[in-house]
Image (cartoon, grey):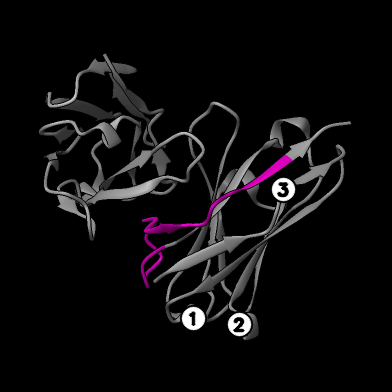
Amino acid sequence: EIVLTQSPGTLSLSPGERATLSCRASQTVTNNYLAWYQQKPGQPPRFLIYGASSRATGIPDRFSGSGSGTDFTLTISRLEPEDFAVYYCQQYGSSPETFGQGTKVEIK
Amino acid sequence: QVQLVQSGSEVKKPGASVKVSCKASGYTFTGYYIHWVRQAPGQGLEWMGWINPNSGGTNYAQKFQGWVTMTRDTSISTVYMELNRLRSDDTAVYYCARGPPEPYQLLWDWGQGTLVTVSS
């Protein structure tokens, strides 16, 4: 099983700042099949990124994904108030597919 | 637009079963896989399995094999997830999510979630 470790656990930033979230896999993620989701309190997750770097439909271009192999990054170029949430990475290249434990982006 | 509407909250006793429904609209029901994911209070996401609404075929995470059953009723565009032999640590919000036409575990659109509380 591929273990995904997200860091940091919590990121304290101000609106307008840049957020950089890391997701590290214990083994190579096949075909860079790495996705990112955003979850706000009391809401279901929202699909953001697939294939490590492709934005889902309707996702603003301030969200970008990068990386390959075992190291992946989600970058939010300029934080908007609605971006403060928990972010999860997920690998779907190998069974069992797994999620990271999440990174909380909070208002500083 | 795509909508997945789940059934309401449930309270169950340990050892009981729960069946959660997920009604789909806004797209061709039989064209896309439906996944189930759960989230314990304050915890992360755990994938449980998928169902192919066209064929009825299923694939369950190893942890849930023999314990979960996913079914569908194409006449009403609804999928169901039944979990048996409930324990207190099954208390969680259960989500259905629509994925691609292939069995990749990408979770495009989500239901609102169903809280299942297991308590004596």
In this rendering, would B99 be left or right of B80?
left
Q: Amino acid at mark 1?
A: Thr
Residue A20 image offset from top left, x and y in percent:
16, 26
Q: Mark 1 or 3 closer to N-term?
A: 3
In this rendering, would A88 be left or right of A12?
right
Q: Mark 2 or 3 closer to N-term?
A: 3
Which of B100 and A106 lies nearest the eye of the viewer?
A: A106
- Residue B79 position (above or below residue A8): below
Depth-wise, is mark 2 or mark 3 nearer the camera? Answer: 3
Residue displayed at 12% across by 41% down: A62
As measured in the structure, the alpha-carbon distance from the residue carrying label 2 to the one carrying label 1 is 7 Å
What range of the chain is rendered magenta? B99-116
The residue labelled by disc 3 is B9
Q: Quadrant of the N terminus of chain A?
A: top left
In this rendering, would A46 be left or right of A42?
left
Q: Amino acid at mark 3?
A: Ser
Which of A63 and B104 lies nearest the eye of the viewer?
A: A63
Residue B109 image offset from top left, x and y in percent:
41, 59
Q: Quadrant of the C terminus of chain A?
A: top left
The residue labelled by disc 1 is B30
Residue displayed at 71% across by 43% down: B116
Which of B37 and A97 lies nearest the eye of the viewer?
A: B37
In this rendering, would B57 be left or right of B81?
left
Specify whether residue B107 is painted magenta: yes
